[in-house]
């Protein structure tokens, strides 16, 4: 990796040197609101190239950060939707369990309170029947 970086730096230095040597005329730069002093055209090209590379890298990092945030937001929204679905399923299960018949309801067909009341009524009816039989 270091070797590759060294080769890239060497090639960029050689390219810069070639630009300076091939374009050795002095040029004045008009910046609309001010005038820059005359400078070598090759040096001006190198400065513009470096400035463009730096601005491009900064914008690429900024765009990558924005995309990374969008990806994370999307991932979190999917996780949120999944958790909401799990909550809904859990609420459905809780409602089913709350509304499902108890053992007494399943066996006797009534609620536990009704079973106890029915048992007490049966005992009362039994005593009253024996009283009725005895009275006849």
Image (spheres, grey):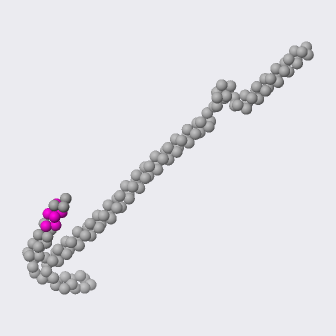
Write the residue at 13% across / 80% down.
40
Magenta region: which residues? 4-10
User: Residue at coordinates 19% horizontally, 59% vertically from top-left?
Assistant: 1
> Quick check: 71 above or below 126?
below
Q: Position of residue 13 (x, y in %)?
A: 14, 70
- In the displayed orientation, state which residue is furthest to the left: 22
Q: Residue at x 69, y 31 (%)?
A: 111
Depicted 106 relative to depicted 79: above or below: above
- Residue at 35% from the left image edge and 58% from the top image edge: 68
Seen in the image, is 133 located left or right of residue 94?
Answer: right
Asked if the stretch drawn in magenta spans residue 121, the answer is: no
Q: Quadrant of residue 123?
A: top right
Residue 51: x and y in percent read 23, 73
Q: Is residue 67 left or right of residue 57?
A: right
In the rendered image, residue 46, in percent from the top left (x then y), is placed at 17, 74
How many numbered markers are drawn? 0
Choose between 27 and 121: the one closer to the eye: 121
Image quarter of residue 90: top right
Type of secondary structure dominating the magenta stretch: helix
Relative to 49, residue 81 above or below? above
The C terminus - image quarter: top right
Q: Residue furthest right?
A: 135
Residue ranking furthest to the top:
136
Rendering quarter of residue 120: top right
Q: Is residue 4 left or right of residue 32?
A: left
């Amino acid at each position: 990796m270091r070797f590759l970086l060294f080769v890239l730096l060497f090639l960029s230095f050689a390219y810069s040197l070639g630009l300076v040597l091939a374009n050795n005329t002095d040029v004045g730069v008009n910046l609309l609101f001010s005038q820059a002093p005359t400078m070598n055209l090759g040096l001006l090209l190198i400065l513009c190239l470096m400035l463009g590379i730096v601005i491009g890298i900064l914008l690429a990092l900024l765009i990558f950060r924005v995309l990374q945030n969008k990806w994370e937001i999307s991932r979190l929204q999917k996780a949120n939707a999944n958790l909401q679905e799990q909550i809904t399923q859990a609420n459905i299960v809780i409602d089913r369990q709350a509304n499902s018949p108890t053992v007494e309801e399943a066996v006797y067909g009534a609620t536990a309170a009704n079973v106890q009341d029915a048992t007490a009524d049966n005992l009362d009816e039994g005593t009253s029947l024996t009283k009725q039989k005895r009275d006849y």
